[in-house]
Image: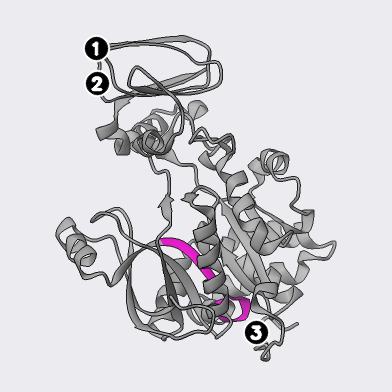
């Protein structure tokens, strides 16, 4: 197959739901969750909500009723053993191991290219491994609508209904309804909007025309690659070269040679935003609960762990004493932790690092990681 020429698939008679393949990008360190989340054990490998399931396992379990065993996972080589232990169902040929982080453009682009070389009629759906979603049934209904909309020739994002004027998320501005059979919620996307000021976010919320951009994309693989080729030709050529070798004995050699040469760019910039400008993007506005578990305040909010006198305690074998205190304790040790007369505290205890902050300052944990890195304390990162 010539990497220069994409063959546009014909009108498939196969039910769009049967053409669906789930892609799970599992990357990112989650620096705001240090010292629990680290380069060697990022947040998707942890049970951060006390549900009994790690984030990546929960992601797979909510997609499996839609895709069956058709799941392609993209993660770092360093996480292979842990990921395979948690997701033994993923076939070796569907495990894409990054030699180094290259952002979502490369990860999702390579996934699309692999699936395209196997079957150009495939509809892929990309869902990050580190999100908390409920109820699962509403999520699955939204994905089904997205698949049916994608089958009409659209890149579809699932927009989250804003619950407050957040300045931490990008937004999607909805246009006209698309009247897609089996997808009554489908709307055109007018534009993607970067993280706004609080004043502008309040206007977005009041208008009802905006959704949070959660980075969930469902699309025909051919359409994804067509836009990638038009906007990032070097990235396109690289992922296609790897994809053509993927199901051959040359897979590892070609990947190891090509992957380090790929440009770093997010899929939003490489594909979604230019595709929206071309009128090729739709949105399914959803109303399920969604959280990207970005800091310890989120863990405190989402955790189902029991409270010990107004302090949430997460950790097997935790030994915590509290008196006149509030907050959250996350522990990987059996060390005794006593909190007395301290409010809104966040304590994260691991064998080699201890974090003490407040929920209000939990977004600033990344600064500690940056500072430790500058001091050369990379062993705890």
Decide: few, some or many residues near mark 3? Use Cα within 10 Å; few <14, some 14-19, many ≥20.
few
Distance Cα–Cα, label 2 vs label 3: 61 Å
Q: Main secondary structure of the magenta part?
A: strand
Q: Nearer the viewer, residue 1 or 173?
A: 173
- The residue to which callout 1 is attached is 341
Magenta segment range? 214-224
Please state which of residues 265 and 288 is positioned toward the viewer in this rendering. Answer: 288
Measured as percent of width and height from the top left, residue 260 is found at: 60, 57
Whether residue 205 sits left or right of residue 133 in the image: it is left
Say whether residue 73 is left or right of residue 217: right
| For residue 139, above or below residue 59 | below
**Rendered view: 67 above or below 301:** below
Would you call the spot at circle 2 few (<14 residues within 10 Å), some (14-19), or many (20 or more)?
A: some
- Give the crowd class for mark 1: few <14, some 14-19, many >=20 residues within 10 Å: few
In-front residue for pair 376/306: 306
Name the residue at 23% across, 63% down. Answer: 205
Provide residue 355's location: percent of width, then percent of height: 38, 23
Comes first in the chain, label 1 or label 3: 3
Residue 68: tell me if it is visible: yes
State the residue position of label 2: 343
- The residue positioned 58% from the left and 60% from the top of the image is 107
Question: Residue 4 got which mark?
Answer: 3
For the residues labelled 1 and 3, the Cα–Cα distance comes to 66 Å
């Amino acid at each position: 197959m010539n990497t220069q020429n994409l063959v546009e698939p014909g009108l498939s008679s196969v039910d769009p739901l049967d053409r669906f393949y789930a892609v799970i990008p599992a990357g990112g360190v989650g620096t705001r969750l240090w010292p629990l989340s680290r380069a060697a054990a990022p947040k998707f490998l942890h049970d951060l909500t006390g549900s009994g399931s790690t984030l990546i396992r929960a992601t797979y379990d909510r997609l499996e009723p839609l895709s069956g065993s058709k799941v392609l996972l993209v993660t770092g080589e360093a996480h292979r053993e842990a990921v395979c232990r948690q997701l033994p169902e993923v076939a070796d040929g569907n495990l894409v191991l990054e030699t180094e982080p290259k952002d979502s453009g490369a990860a999702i682009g390579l996934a699309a290219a692999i699936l395209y070389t196997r079957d150009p009629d495939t509809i892929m759906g990309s869902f990050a491994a580190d999100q908390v979603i409920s109820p699962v049934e509403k999520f699955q209904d939204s994905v089904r609508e997205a698949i049916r909309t994608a089958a009409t020739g659209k890149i579809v994002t699932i927009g989250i209904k804003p619950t407050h004027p957040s300045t931490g998320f990008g937004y999607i501005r909805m246009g006209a309804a698309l009247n897609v059979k089996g997808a009554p919620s489908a709307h055109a996307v007018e534009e993607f909007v970067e993280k706004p000021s609080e004043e502008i976010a309040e206007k977005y919320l009041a208008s009802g025309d905006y959704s949070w951009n959660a980075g969930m994309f469902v699309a025909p693989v051919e359409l994804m690659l067509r836009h990638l080729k038009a906007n990032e030709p070097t990235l396109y050529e690289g992922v296609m070269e790897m994809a053509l070798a993927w199901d051959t004995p040359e897979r590892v050699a070609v990947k190891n040679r090509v992957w380090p040469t790929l440009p770093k760019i997010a899929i939003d910039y490489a594909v979604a935003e230019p595709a929206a400008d071309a009128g090729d993007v739709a949105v399914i506005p959803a109303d399920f609960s969604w959280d990207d578990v970005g800091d310890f305040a989120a863990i405190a909010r989402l955790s189902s762990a029991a409270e010990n006198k107004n302090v949430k305690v997460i950790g097997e074998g935790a030994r915590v004493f509290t008196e006149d205190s509030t907050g959250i304790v996350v522990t990987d040790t059996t060390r005794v932790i006593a909190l007395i007369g301290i409010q809104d505290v966040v304590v994260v205890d691991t064998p080699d690092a201890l974090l003490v902050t407040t929920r209000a300052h939990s977004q600033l944990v990344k600064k500690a990681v940056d500072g430790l890195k500058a001091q050369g304390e990379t062993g705890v990162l």
